[in-house]
Image (cartoon, helix red, strand yellow):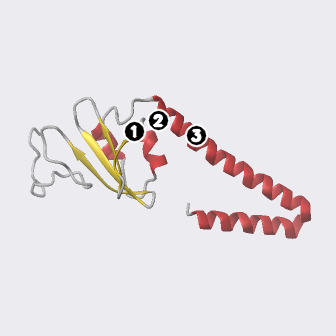
Amino acid sequence: MNPVIGWALAAAFAGLAWLHYGWRGLVLAASVIVFWLLLQFSRAMRVMRRAGAAPVGEVGSAVMLHAKLHAGMRLLDVLPLAGALGRKVADAPETFEWRDASGARVRVEFERGRCVRWTLSRPDDAPADAGGRAADAAPGATPPGA
């Protein structure tokens, strides 16, 4: 959710609580808002703890990670899919990479905190674009080894 919308909803909730129940409603609204923020913080810490326990930049299957990615995902959404923190390979745009045991790797680019591009590279094949096709393969062509 957009943070501006979230804070606007929280302010509207606090205002309505004040109008209907006075200071007691405002205290209740503040309690609910703080509880929601604690839930979000707890989720972030749980995801980071699990991802931090695994080796940096390693994933069980790069192909499966590549298949589950979609545009607009936040890094906090990608980390549970990968199961590990990614190895940062570039700052502008912010780019992270995960590799699996076969040597395949997924490179994910984030702009303004959201996933915009991702590529899958295999040791034997040409890199695949975000649509999943090999970059130099003709549309509808059968990939090598299939």
Q: Of marks 3 and 1, which one's residue comes earlier in the chain?
A: 3
- Quadrant hosting residue 57: top left
- Residue 45, disc: 3
Q: Is residue 55 left or right of residue 42?
A: left
Residue at 16% over, 37% down: 123
Q: Nearer the viewer, residue 81 or 38?
A: 38
Q: Residues within 10 Å of mark 3 (few under 14, many from 20)?
A: few
Name which residue type carries label 2. Ala
What residue is pinned by disc 1?
A: 82
Task: Pinpoint residue 47: horizontal percent, then vertical percent.
Answer: 52, 39
Q: CA distance from mark 2 to mark 1?
A: 8 Å
Q: How far apart are labels 3 and 1 at the CA level? A: 16 Å
- Density class for disc 2 (Cα within 10 Å; few <14, some 14-19, many ≥20) is many
Residue 50 lies left or right of residue 91; in this view the side is right
The number of discs equals: 3
* Residue of label 2: 51
> Which amino acid does the dot numbered 3 rest on?
Met
Dot 1 alpha-carbon crowd within 10 angstroms: few under 14, some 14 to 19, many 20 or more: many
Could you say where residue 35 lies in the image, as x and y percent from the top left? 73, 48
Which secondary structure, mark 3?
helix
Q: Tag 1: residue type?
A: Ala
**Label 2's element?**
helix
| The N terminus: image quadrant | bottom right
Q: Quadrant of residue 14?
A: bottom right
Mark found first going from the N terminus, 2 or 1: 2
User: Which residue lies at the image location 66% right of the left edge and 45% below the top edge?
Assistant: 39
Seen at 9% across and 38% down, the residue is 145
Q: Relative to residue 5, is residue 142 depicted above or below?
A: above
Image quarter hosting the C terminus: top left
Query: With respect to residue 36, does 124 lie above or below?
Result: above
In-image side of 4 versus 142 (left or right): right
In three-dimensional space, the C-alpha distance between marks 2 and 3, rounded to whole angstroms, equals 10 Å
